[in-house]
Image: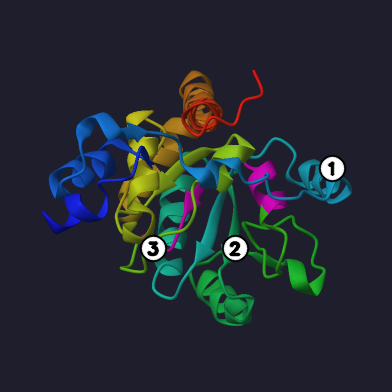
Amino acid sequence: ATFRYLTQDVRLVFAQNIEMARALQRLGMRATRVEVSGNLKALADPLPVDQAARASLAAAFADAPLWVAASTHPGEDAILLGAHEILRQTMPAARLILVPRHPERAADIAMLAQKAGFSVARRAQGDAPEADVYLADTLGEMGLWYALAPVVFLAGSLKPIGGHNPFEVAHSGAALISGPHVANFQETYTTFEEHNAVRYAATAPEIADHLCHLLQDAQALDTARAEARSVIADQKGKLDALADQLITSLELSDA
């Protein structure tokens, strides 16, 4: 009753997904005043990409099956390296770009990868990228890594960290794999689920299964990448419609 009283003069509320709209209605907001709009995060510009670096690295990676493990946190690297080890049993030429959330962890991750039997190259040290694991231990280059690989595992999700923003991956057109712990971006991931644009995995074998499927089946990969792009297109369409509704509702049009 209190919520209904506080919102009695509100003409229209735009929720970013159906779950939030239903929650508002349960609190007392009239259904006729609640609309489902898009997610404003989808309007952010794509991450910048150094095109010269992209061309150079693309040539170095050549036609190797390639994936990115992005924004990794402590406890996740071992799982992701385990997935890479399993993947290479089927695809020996597969390469991994591993991007730690905090680059100061790079030395420890490099040691972990070397103990697992991988050759390692480090971006920050200027190493040539021809290695089993390319450690992208720099800041401000995430757009470059997303642009290089057709498949991205978005970390911060294998441990109860809360996840990271999947719209940045979708903007690049990469297929998305995530762990189950995405509480900080749950409403965003719900949108991805509605488009079949995310694949969840909690263990190294599960991650490797998704990677094998996507990197060996060109049609499946094309479909997964199209699904990711469709999330962005759908959200932008909804937000355009939202702008039109606001103009009409607030009588802002000159017409």
Q: Residue at x 60, y 34 (%)?
A: 173
Looking at the rendered structure, the kind of residue marked 1 is Ala
Q: Which residues are magenta?
A: 143-157
Give 202 or 8, whichever is nearer the viewer: 8
Q: Is residue 178 visible?
A: yes
Separation of residues labelled 2 and 1 (CA atoms): 19 Å
Which label was assigned to residue 55?
Answer: 1
Looking at the rendered structure, the kind of residue marked 3 is Ile
Residue 221 in the image: state x and y as whole percent: 50, 27
Q: Residue at x 85, y 45 (%)?
A: 51
Q: Residue at x 59, y 74 (%)?
A: 110
Residue marked by disc 3: 79
Q: Residue at x 73, y 45 (%)?
A: 61
The mark nearer the N terminus, 2 or 3, is 3
Residue 24 in the image: state x and y as whole percent: 23, 46
Q: Is residue 32 above or below residue 119?
A: above
**Mark 3 crowd level (few <14, some 14–19, many ≥20, 10 Å Cα):** some
Query: Dot 1 lies on which element?
Result: helix
Separation of residues labelled 1 and 3 (CA atoms): 30 Å
Residue 26 image-quadrant placement: top left
Residue marked by disc 2: 99
Query: Dot 2 lies on which element?
Result: strand
